[in-house]
Image (cartoon, rainbow, N blue to C red):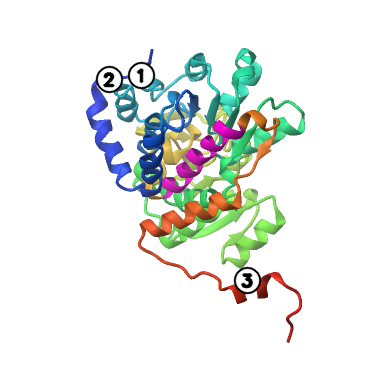
Amino acid sequence: MSKIKDPSLASAGRKKIEWAESRMPVLMKLRAIHSKKKTLQGFKISGCLHVTKETAVLVETFKASGAQVAWSGCNPLSTQDDVCAALDAKGVEMFAWRGLTPNEYYWCIEETLKIKPQLTLDDGADLIFTVHTKHTEYLNGLEGGTEETTTGVHRIRAMAKDGKLRYPIIAVNDAETKSDFDNVYGTGQSAIDGVIRATNVLFAGKNVVISGYGHCGKGLSSRARGLGANVIVTEVDSIQALRARMDGYSVMSMGKAARTGDIFITATGCKDVITKDHFAQMKDGAILANAGHFNVEYSISDLEALSKKKREIRPDNVEYTLPNGRRVYALAEGRLVNLAAAEGHPSEVMDMSFANQFLSILRLSGEGKNLKPDVYEIPRSQDEEVARLKLESMGMEIDSLSKEQIKYLTSWESGT
């Protein structure tokens, strides 16, 4: 039995889902094929992933393919309640609403496990963690799972390294058609969208500090520069820092950037990137946003302890007044700004990520029983197929190698 905020929102949510379907041609093509075959008939899937219109297209593709699905959100502030209601109205067991407490958040995850799933789908590995620690009674029935995001992949790789992982997980995040597109173009656009919705601030002429120059940081830096910002990158990895510099960005420590930045966006997957010493140095009016999975990248507890006053200025925007009188603005409680203050990634880019999720779940439904507990990569052939289908949907063609070219590229005899 579902638990959601407001079933009457289903009609509004359905319109959003239909919009997403019109912009996710790869996933919809897979739905058309597998809904006829009922490829997932008899399988139960528990999912823990942001409840957005794009996620709804994936969930309904599972359902159309014959699966029973129970779903929770993977972040207390990312659930779109109208989309949640629309899925509930179509018979998906939904346990999610915006504004969950930590206890409610984990209760929702636990409720999805009551269907006794053979397959799991996760974003951040909280479901995987829960079933390994609190509900081990479900482990014997699990044949495989997938993980959507960088933070979650780090967690499950650590579990595997420690010998704690009990069923096979496919690292969907690491597919090129996911990380090189969703993380770069999706995060780059949607996180800045979240900052703008929460502040209506002008990026042009601002010093924008991007912490972390991985896939997400690269996308954020590019989009901020495109809006006319002066981009400063902070890093702990010397190679990534050098890449950022060669890409034309300033590179400095957070200690120095704290005195310079107007807008700070963290995208590291690590905790305590910005702490009390940095807050104390910031300009009056500095804005803090996080694009990493968990709300630990800039320390809200440090900010609370340091401030003498706080007030909500507008939705997802809290003003903290420091002892020196300067004001710092924290967005979306330090949670994912692109999902808490905006709508998440555009449908067009999630099309590829969720096509990979669907294909990976299909693979596990057939092979999962025979795979040992470990973290698995998406095969290159799947990555290429998703890219080919996406190009096709965009009306684009590419060349193919001739036999002579293949021979040249795979032999060693040819020289000058």
The location of residue 250, given as percent across then percent down, is 59, 62
Left or right of 41 in this view: 299: right
Nearer the N terminus, badge 3 or badge 1?
1
Task: Tell me if mark 2 has few (under 14), some (14-19) or many (20+) residues whose alpha carbon lies within 10 angstroms of its own.
Answer: some
Q: Which residue is mark 2?
A: 7
| Disc marking residue 406 | 3
- Residue visible at 61% across and 76% down? 404
Left or right of 275 in this view: 11: left
Q: Are discs 2 and 3 less than 8 Å apart at CB?
A: no
* In front of the other: 56 or 41: 41
Q: Nearer the viewer, mark 3 or mark 1?
A: 3
The location of residue 295, given as percent across then percent down, is 54, 33
Q: Are discs 2 and 1 less than 8 Å apart at CB?
A: yes
Inter-mark Cα distance, 2 to 1: 7 Å
Task: Tell me if mark 3 has few (under 14), some (14-19) or many (20+) residues whose alpha carbon lies within 10 angstroms of its own.
Answer: few
The location of residue 414, given as percent across then percent down, is 73, 81
Task: Tell me if mark 1 has few (under 14), some (14-19) or many (20+) residues whose alpha carbon lies within 10 angstroms of its own.
Answer: some
The location of residue 352, given as percent across then percent down, is 46, 48
Q: Which residues are magenta?
A: 349-367
Vertical comparison of 212 with 6: above or below: below
| Disc marking residue 4 | 1
SS for callout 2: helix
